[in-house]
Amino acid sequence: MAIFQTADAQGNLTKLINIAEGKPQRIGTLLDKIASKGNFSFAYNNTTVPADSLVSVSGYSGTVFSILEKILGNTYEYQEVPGYVVLRYAPGSLYITADMERGQGNQILIRGYVHNVINDKGIPRASVFEKNLLVSTLTDDRGYFELRVKNWNGPLLINVRKENFRDTSVHLLADVVVTGKQEKPDYKYYPDQGSAGVERSRFARFFLSSKQMIQGLNLGNFFTASPYQVSFTPGLSSHGLYNSQIIDHFSLNLLGGYTAGIDGFEMGGLFNINRKNVQYFQVAGVFNFVGGNAKGVQLAGLYNKVVNNAGGLQAAGLVNKTRNFTSGIQLAGLANINGRANGALHVAGLLNIYDEAKAVTIAGLANLGHNNSHVQVAGILNKTGGTSVFQLSGFMNVAKRVKGIQVGMVNIADTSDYAIGILNFIKNGEKSIAVSTDETMFMQVNFRSGGRILYTVLGAGYKPGTERMRYQLNLGIGAHLIDHPRFYFNTEFTTSIITDFKENHYQMNSLKALPGIKLNKHIKLFAGPSLNISSAEAGTDMPSTGWIIRKYGGNTNVNILSVGLSGGLQYAW
């Protein structure tokens, strides 16, 4: 008997279908075809339904129920709910014996046993419940149970469910006292979403009793709603053991609580644990654990875990972890860990870790993406295994492909047009070492590295002779404006510090136009003019070189605007 059955006008199990193909095929594939023909979906557990086994049903014409028995046999139970046929492995059969005793007022005590049909032995840890009154219990080792019902008039339908056994139930008739209309709860079926939920999480199970876990496994994915619940701990709840099947609109957990889900507001002094979905608002002093999806505001002092998808505002003192963050803002003091990190913004004190991101990710230490990323900003490291739009870090950026700009001390990529860093290792870019000189007569060695368009200059120079300031350090940025097989044209802006490494130094900023010719694949010659501004403190022995356009300054500094010429020999690879 299907205890929650709410079939359509024409049951899906009685629909007629025709299957012509005769070649062997996977049971899972065949179930998908049957569901498509019948305009519904199958829900089942892959561990109990042999979806990968091969079957052949050539020329079948008949009901959905008949073909299910043909391919699966008689060890399964089929339950119809709106939009679904639930396939449940149930080779065993059980029966229930019960009687009831009315106490003072409308209190009723129901006592009985649940037995195995095959050997008449008592069945332990079977769920016994009255689904309209939201009360339940578990049988003991002898199969014995007691169920207390309050404020109910009329017949009772006592249901029994146990994993790997067919459902059964018994009607109990009580004296009817005429009162106002008593509303019955509406049950809905929520299919599994292909991920390990509360039942498979060691972390969540640590805070739940074995009775609560068994109750949830026995009763499965049928849930109803309640206006509110109050818990002291998960085992001390106003819903008792039935809390695993009830979605609440308001939930208050003084220390911690366990519910099927939240459609409204939940607050936990220490923690909240939910089997399925949570939406609107959830807050806990230590952690939230959601076995389904979370939508809205989720706040935790330390840890938020959403097994499937989350969206809205999620904030934790230490860690947020989701399968996918679909929209909104995610904030963590330590780390955000996601499959897909979408939405608007992900901010973490140390790490953002994800498979793929279409959002801005900001981390104090590192952003680590296995596939594509969008905008990455990190104090130390940005790393993505696919494409990134923008990377900014205090030390290193690593990507396979960068569509936009990389800014960091070290940039590494297969493809990047705009790499700005001290060292750039770009496969589609160019690296070179050049020996050159200019109007200052310094002999310079400069290393250039970058992407297809932008590159950086890092180098040093030395000036033979008797001048005190004979050492030069160069840092700059350049752009490949023209790249022809025989010639090229670059422009650069560089800053040079000329010093004696003691007390004296001056700075020269230069804007250079550098046309050149390619002697072969690696050797290039270049030469071009520059516009220079040299600056030093007043009293510094700063030489005047090049064509002087203007000298200006004050009591504290001296500036020289001049035009110069530079050129050299370059080896590129």
Image (cartoon, rainbow, N blue to C red):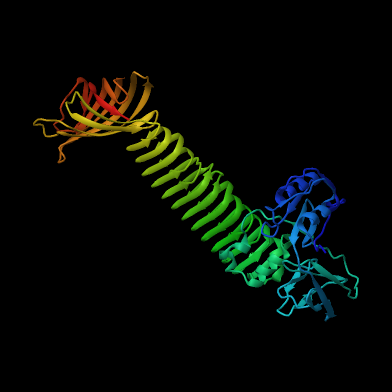
At 54% across and 63% down in the image, what residue appears?
A: 286
- Relative to residue 139, is residue 73 depicted above or below? above
On the question of residue 363 being in view, the answer is no
Residue 243, image x, y percentages: 69, 66
Quadrant where the C terminus sits is: top left
Can residue 244 be seen here? yes
- Indicate left or right for 347 with 111 as reference: left
The number of callouts visible is: 0
Residue 158 picture quarter: bottom right
Q: Nearer the viewer, residue 8 or 70?
A: 70
Q: What percent of the width, then of the height, locates residue 462?
A: 16, 32
Is 330 located above or below residue 401 in the figure? below
Please indicate whether residue 422 sits to the left or right of residue 57 in the image.
Answer: left
- x, y percent for residue 255: 59, 69
The front one of 163 and 75 is: 75
Left-right relation of 367 to 200: left
Tell me where residue 258 sits by quadrant: bottom right
- Camera-side residue: 42 or 276? 42
Position of the N terminus, as image quadrant, is bottom right
Residue in view at x 49 percent, y 50 percent: 353
